[in-house]
Amino acid sequence: MAKGRNWLWAATGGAFVLLLSAAVGLIVVETGAYDVAATRAHAPLTRWALDTTMRNSVERQAADLRPPERFTPEMIAAGAGEYQAMCAQCHGGPGIEREEWAQDMRPLPPRLTEAADAWRPRELFWIAKHGIRMTGMPAFGPTHDDATLWNIAGFVDRLPGMTAAQYAAFATDDGEAEAGDAASHGDHAHTH
């Protein structure tokens, strides 16, 4: 009989905690008590929860994607042009900073010259195609074909090993020649 009573108390206590949590959450939502200003960084626990959720979600969603067997210099050069037109404003590049207005985004867009090393090309493709909610990262899939997005992923995959001179060369006529150099020297091991 005591076991049954203990189970009843535990179930009642659990239900009470759930109802109390739901009530507090509803109060925060309805009163606007949570500060959503981009001028303030997330609390460390919130930042961890959002980062961990995003990383795990992207890895799971992209798990079945198959990148091209190889990113050719032409693909990397094409991806460079798209990156410089659509991505560098927020993410910067080797030797260039992100635009001033992007400095105050929350979360701050990662500098892909370092952060891309932690992602596989298929994950970079998935992010470019689908975007990331509540981060300012748009979904380019509705306006760009998969070949273009794979080119971007191939280029971003090379950013961690790329010099400022190699990056700048993509904006000139000899960008395709530099793409071959970036492709051969930009290979790096991923953490996954």
Image: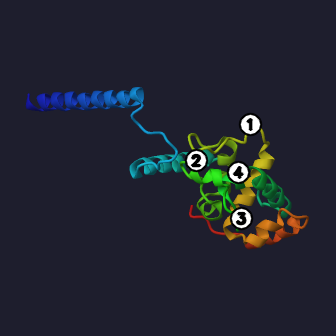
Q: Viewer-proximal residue, 136 or 73?
A: 136
Q: Are marks 1 and 4 in contact (CB under 8 Å)?
A: no
Q: Is 101 positioned to the left or the right of 173 in the image? A: left
Q: What number is the disc on residue 43?
A: none
- Badge 1 density bin: few <14, some 14–19, many ≥20, Cα 10 Å: few
Q: Which amino acid does label 3 sit on?
A: Arg
| Residue at image mark 2 | 58
Q: Can residue 65 be seen in this view?
A: no
- Tell me residue 163's x, y (percent): 73, 72
Colour scheme: rainbow
* Residue at 20% across, 27% down: 12
Q: What residue type is labelled 1?
A: Pro
Of pointers 4 and 2, the one earlier in the residue sequence: 2
| Residue at image mark 1 | 142
* Residue at 56% across, 52% down: 108
User: What secondary structure is marked by label 4?
Assistant: loop
Of pointers 2 and 3, the one earlier in the residue sequence: 2
Q: Which amino acid does label 4 sit on?
A: Arg
Distance, label 2 to label 3, CA atoms, is: 19 Å
| Residue at image mark 3 | 158
Q: Residue 93's quadrant in the figure?
A: bottom right
Depth check, mark 4 against mark 2: the one in front is: 2
Depth check, mark 4 against mark 3: the one in front is: 3
User: What secondary structure is marked by label 2?
Assistant: helix
- Badge 2 density bin: few <14, some 14–19, many ≥20, Cα 10 Å: some
Q: Do the residues labelled 4 and 2 touch (CB within 8 Å)?
A: no
- Tell me residue 96's x, y (percent): 70, 64
Of pointers 1 and 4, the one earlier in the residue sequence: 4
| Residue at image mark 4 | 66
